[in-house]
Amino acid sequence: MKRIVLTGTVFIAITYALGRFSYGLFMPEISAALRLSEASSGSIASMAYAGYCLALLTASSLVRWGGGRGTLQLAGVCVLLGLLLIGTAGHGLSLAVGLALTGLSSGWASPAYGEVVHSGLQPEQHGRGNAWINSGTSWGLVVLGPIAYFFSAEWRFAYLGFAVLAALAILMQWRLLPQARAQENRSAPGVPSRLWRTGGRLMGAAFAVGAASAVYWTFARSMWQAWHGLTGDSAAFLWLLMGVSGILGGFAGVVVERFGQGAAYRWGVGILMLSICGITLSGLPVLMLSAILFGIAYIFLTGIFIVWGTRCFPRHAAFGISLAFLMLGVGQFGGSMAAGVLIEATSYAVAFLSFGLFGLAGLAIRPTVPRSD
C-alpha cells in the first residue's frame, strides 16, 4: 500500500497543485506580463477545466485499454508539456494550451489511480488509499506556497522548475507502480447501466461544489491583494496555509467510515461555503481562517466524491471517479468564466458571496448510494 499511496500522492501533487491550480496563485504576475484582463484571465483559467473535463470523458475507456499505469504515464507527459508551455508562454493562446494540457493530465490521473488502488490494494484499504492519494493536492500547495513567495516575479522560472519535478514524477511512477492489469480492464463494460439513477445525486453534488470552488481557486489571491490590500508575500502565506490545512482532508475516508457519508458530505459543504463567504470579511485572522477552512473542505469533499463514486459503481472504480470529477470540472469550467465576468461587472465581494450562496444548493442533495451497477 505504501508504494502506491506515496507514488500517487506525489503525482497528484504535480498534476493538480503545480499543474492546474498554480495559475491562480501566479495569475497577477502572468496577467501583467501578458497584458490580460480579469475576464481574459478567467477564460484562460477555464481551459484547464476544459481539458480536465475532456480527460474525464475518455478516462474510463483509456484505463480499460491501457491500464492504470499506462494512463498515468500519458498523464505525466501531458503535465510535463503543459508546464513547459506555460513557462515559455508569450501570449494568451500558448498559455491556454498549456493549461489545457495540465487539465488533461489531472483528469486522467485520478481515475487511473482509482483503478490502481482498486486492483492493487485490499478492499478495506480502498477508501483510505484513495483519500490519501487525493490529499496530494494539498502537499503540492505546501510546496507551491514558498515557491510563489520567493519566485512570484520569476514565474517562468518557477514553471520550468515544476516541469523538472514532473519529469521526476514520471520516472518514479515507471519504477514503482505495479504493472496494470490491462486485459481485465478491457473486458469490463465501459458504461454501467441506469447511469442517472445510480450516479445522479453524485453528479449534482460534484457540479455544485465545483462551480462554487472555482472562484476561490482562480481569484483568491487577486481578492487578497486587490480587495483587502495584502502584499504578495501575505497572499503567498495564505495560499501556503490553505495547502497545509488541506492535508487534513486526507482523513475523508476515515470520517466516512466512522460517521457516514451523508454527515461527512454535509459538514464538508457547509465549511466550504463558509470559507468562500468568509474571504469577503476584513482582517488577516479572518482571512487565515477562510484559507484554512477552504483547504480542509475542498480536499475533504473531493475525497468523499472518490469514495462515493466507487461505492456507486463498485465494479467500475475508474468510471465512478471519472463521473464525479467530470461534474466537478464542468462546474469549475463554468464557474471560472462566470467569476471573471461577475468581478468585472460588480466587485470581488459580490462575486465571492454569490458563489458561496450558490454552493449551498449542494446541501439539498442527499448522498445516498443506490447499488445498481
Image: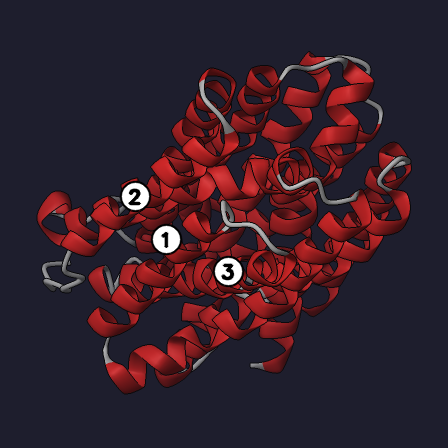
Kind of residue indicated by mark 1: Met
Element type at mark 2: helix
Spot occupied by residue 6 in the image (x, y as percentages of width and height):
65, 73
Q: Quadrant of residue 208?
A: top left
Residue at x 43%, y 43% (from the top left corner): 59
Near mark 2 (Cα within 10 A), the count class, few <14, some 14-19 or many ≥20, is some
**Residue that numbered label 2 is attached to:** 357
Q: Crowdedness of circle 3 by 10 Å Cα count: few (<14), some, many (20+)?
A: many
At x 28%, y 45%, the residue is 190
In the rendered structure, which disc, 3 or 1, sits on the residue that comes first in sequence?
3
The x, y position of residue 242, in whole percent, is 61, 60
Inter-mark Cα distance, 1 to 2: 7 Å
Whether 144 is drawn above or below 41: the answer is: below
Viewer-proximal residue among 170 and 140: 140
**Identity, as a three-letter code, of the amino acid under mark 3:** Tyr
Numbered label tally: 3
Q: Which mark is residue 273?
A: 1
Are the residues flagged by discs 1 and 2 in contact, CB closer than 8 Å? yes
- Say above or below: 99 vs 300: above
**From where the camera sits, is residue 47 visible?**
yes
Quadrant location of the C terminus in the rendered image: bottom left
Going from the N terminus, do you reach mark 1 or mark 2 first? 1
Residue 126 visible: no
Q: Is residue 328 left or right of residue 311?
A: right
